[in-house]
Amino acid sequence: MASTADIRNGVVLNIDGQLWNVVEFQHVKPGKGGAFVRTKLKNVVSGKVVDRTYNAGAKVDIENVDRRDFQFLYRDGDDFVFMDTDTYEQTPVPAGVVGDAANYLLENQSATIAMNNGNPLYVELPASVVLEVTYTEPGLQGDRSSAGTKPATLETGAEIQVPLFLETGTKVKVDTRSGDYLGRVS
């Protein structure tokens, strides 16, 4: 058990069996009354953000979360198999943990996985990835980038909105957080 003096940005707390990442903390010593620590916590799994206040010296349960680089190898049923780039050990990660990252995940792609006691918590991809458009309706003469968008299917199976002038076979840069089209890659 640790105390509130050990709370820092990036520390992961175990509160009622759930893991919460400290986004912000502030130690407050008012003129009268006892000191306290005001925190902003983000749920590691769901992403929900809450504010929580602790009295100074209160006991908190700090968890060890290990963030390591992995390489995506292949899908095995509902699991995604990743390889630790340091130890070459293969780790299956359930589809529920991978979440929306599966829409932008190609074989041999790098990803960061947060682990707690050997259990994967979440998968983090680079901010953007380059993917090929496997199908989109053909563009018409005169279509320009400011004219609008159309749906396009990527090589991973994900569907995004792209400008009207893009054609099948074009490589595009995609934001992995929002799924937005960022531009063409030549």
Image (cartoon, grey):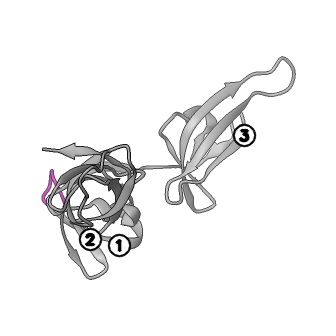
Residue drawn at the location 54% of the way across and 38% of the way down: 23
Residue 84 within the segment the image draws in magenta: yes
Inspect this view and state whether residue 12 appears.
yes
Q: Position of residue 1 (x, y in %)?
A: 57, 47
Q: In front here: 180 or 18?
A: 180
Secondary structure state at the residue bearing disc 2: strand
Residue on which disc 2 sits: 80
Q: Marks 1 and 3, Cα distance to the nearest angstrom?
A: 34 Å
| Category of crowding for the residue at label 1, using alpha-carbon neighbours closer than 10 angstroms: few (below 14), some (14–19), many (at least 20) | some
Please identify the quarter of the rendering in which residue 73 is found.
bottom left
Amino acid carrying mark 1 in the image = Pro
Taking 66 as reference, is 15 left or right? right
Q: Earlier in the sequence, mark 3 or mark 2?
A: 3
Name the residue that disc number 3 marks: 53
Q: Which residues, given as a range, are shown in magenta?
A: 83-88
Categorize mark 2 by other alpha carbons within 10 Å: few (<14), some (14-19), many (20+).
some
- In this view of the protein, which residue sits in the foreground, 147 or 61? 147
Q: Which residue in the structure is indicated by mark 1?
A: 94
Marks 1 and 2 close (CB-CB < 8 Å): yes
Q: Which amino acid does label 2 sit on?
A: Phe
